[in-house]
Image (cartoon, rainbow, N blue to C red):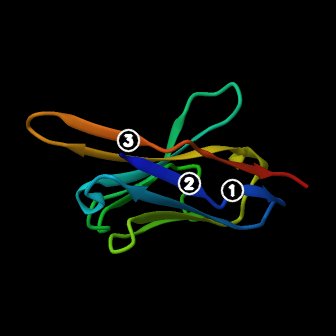
Amino acid sequence: QVQLVESGGGLVQPGGSLRLSCLASGFTFSTYAMSWYRQAPGKERELVASIGNLGISRKYADSVKGRFTISRDNAKNTVSLQMSSLKPEDTAVYFCKGSRGTTIANYEYWGQGTQVTVSS
């Protein structure tokens, strides 16, 4: 059974930091690219950051560059998102996603999300 379980969300003041983690199980984690998405109320889900299966390639949304860092530990089947200098506009539900494309099919798994609220 595939599972992606996010943790680490919560309430933080503007300028503060949070570290989100996503624990994966039920698939070969090291062969999947991993991403963090977020969805704010009334808005579409957007890509925040992604990391290749070996942890070499990383990409970030312009809105979080220089403030967020994505990392992964293939030995522990985890992907993390370190968030710093948080702003109220970072408030959203954050989701992790695993994806892998083959010549036969594309595979995609989502977690249930964790709420991040940035407010004073």
State the image coordinates of residue 10 (x, y, percent, origin top left): 75, 56
Frontmost residue, 59 versus 39: 39
Question: Within 10 angstroms of label 1, few (less than 14), some, or many (20 or more) residues?
Answer: some
CB of mark 2 within 8 Å of CB of mark 1? yes
- Secondary structure, mark 3, is strand
Q: Please give left or right for residue 31 compared with residue 58 in the image.
A: left
* Residue hosting label 3: 109
Q: Which tag, 3 or 1, sits closer to the chain's start?
A: 1
Q: Quadrant of residue 110?
A: top left
Image point 25% across, 57% down: which residue? 28
CB of mark 3 within 8 Å of CB of mark 1? no
Frontmost residue, 88 versus 65: 88
State the image coordinates of residue 26 (x, y, percent, origin top left): 33, 52
State the image coordinates of residue 40 (x, y, percent, origin top left): 67, 35
Q: Please give left or right for residue 21 compared with residue 89 in the image.
A: left
Identify residue type, mark 1.
Gly
86 w.r.t. 36: above or below: below
Q: Quadrant of residue 25?
A: bottom left
Mark sitting on residue 9: 1
* Residue hosting label 2: 6
